[in-house]
Amino acid sequence: MANIFRNIPSVNELLESPQLKKIVQTVNHQVVVDGVRTFIDDLKETISAATDDIEIPAPGELAEKIADWLHVEQRPYLRPVINGTGIILHTGLGRAPLANSAVEETMAIARGYASVEIDLADGQRGQRVKAVEKLLCELTGAEAAVVVNNNAAATMIALATVATGKEVIVSRGQLIEIGGSYRLPDVMECSGCKLKEVGTTNKTHAADYSSAVGEETSAILKVHPSNFEVVGFTNTVSTKELVSIAHAHDLPMIDDVGSGALIDFAKFGLSNEPVVADSIKDGADIVLFSGDKLIGGPQCGIIIGKRKYIDQVLKNSLMRAMRVDKMTLAALAATLRLYRNTETAEREVPILRMLSMPEANLKLRAQKIVEQIQDQRWVKSCVVAESQSMLGGGSLPTQKIPTWCVAVEPQDSSVNRIAARLRSATPAVIGRVQKDTLLIDLRTVFPEQDMILVETLESLSTPPQEGSRDA
């Protein structure tokens, strides 16, 4: 065994190879040295564990293998992806893609300094929320607004502001849990308030709230159960009724609408998603929602409502830990401006454009892609398939959107192996696997990505690069 190890070139010898010298020119020298050492250590472990003799590659061949491996290892973890899953708000893929104007404004602000907390009119210190507050109030009818890093943070800081040490009344049917083990009771506990459940899982009445109000009550909270649906023998209390009960006892009514629709999604065939402005119109004192779901903006949590409560939130010491940066504010402001004209928003905001994409258009695009890849040597069959997309992001889980897909069955390789090669491509492509078929849903693929998708699928006819995960 020791004699075999002597056949492995030294680190210095390998670093002198043209292949690795070229990488040193583009990557830190120490990174390459560490990579070579790691590769050699792994090779020695493989040799030690082997039951049969292993042939050590020649120095040049070994350097080539290490170079290929380093190319794969040095790729950024966060990379662009073509979303062929059909899930429009895919949490694992970053939820909503931004509108072009939001990307451009973010880039302009990110490149240098920006008026984040300076009022350029008088040169005095200002509040960063001013970048978006006027727009949010204009679009929703609220008196004031503030932005934090996500809707969980919005819920926590709102409760911590108005209800620390006191009770908050919530329907038992609204004690939600969402992805990542986020549970509303846990968030309420972290905020310092006490949960007081009323009603049952399927039915809560106005009288349940009224009779629960006591000396320790500080607020009534309504939560939209966006990621599940209770059907059948049910009853919920409207925002307007809850406002009436809360105000009768001089309490704030907090409405967590979740995904945050600025327009009615019924026009896309999707129902039961509350519109933010309706909560304000119904008299809610504080309304909470996400900026990166149905609005189609950057990840953030938005708090709107009565000025006296929003001012209290701004003064909360948690605000500094939860505030957003200049790039989030720039992207959100640009996205909100598009909603000043609904037709503009539907044309420019990607998630709205995806939802309004005609089925005939999707089918035609799928047909063109099938025609270009069906003769590839790795393809056993490639057809246009009718299917269903989903909104995703914890929104409207029971409602499906008709769509068209490219359905590919591989010839001599498993569908999971093909899916793995596509994830390793540049850009990565992610579809959904059904039995022995890979489906690529065109509803979540931008039309300008069609040719890139074709080229990536065609590249699968070439054996995988040495050093890649599926080689």
Image: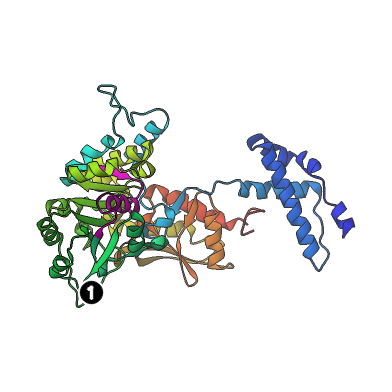
x, y percentage for residue 328? 36, 41
Query: Where does the magenta region start and end?
Result: 145-167
In the rendered structure, does residue 159 fall within the stretch colored magenta? yes
Quadrant of the snapshot with the N terminus: bottom right
Q: Report the quarter where the C terminus lies.
A: bottom right
Task: State left or right for residue 65 relative to residue 226.
Answer: right
Q: What element carries label 1?
A: loop
Front-most of 24 and 304?
304
Which of the 4 quarters of the picture holds residue 233?
bottom left
**In the depicted view, which residue is nearer to us: 222 or 471?**
222
Q: Which residue is drawn at 17% across and 72% down?
A: 235
Total labels: the figure holds 1
Compared across the picture, whether 263 is left or right of 406 comes to: left
Give above or below for 6 relative to 178.
above
Whether residue 385 appears in this view of the structure is yes
Above or below, comparing residue 412 to residue 352 in the picture: below
Residue at figure coordinates x 40%, y 56% from the top left? 91
Q: In which quarter of the image is residue 266?
A: bottom left
Residue 173 falls inside the magenta stretch: no
Looking at the picture, the colour scheme in use is rainbow
Residue 44, compared with residue 28, is above or below; it is below
Q: Position of residue 9 (x, y in %)?
A: 82, 47
The percent position of residue 282, horizontal first and vertical second, equals 12, 54
Within 10 angstroms of label 1, few (less than 14), some, or many (20 or more) residues? some
Kindly indicate the quadrant of the structure image that contains residue 93.
bottom left
Judge by depth and name the residue closer to the eye, 77 or 170: 170
Q: Which residue is painted at 38% across and 50% down in the image?
A: 446
For label 1, the residue is 202
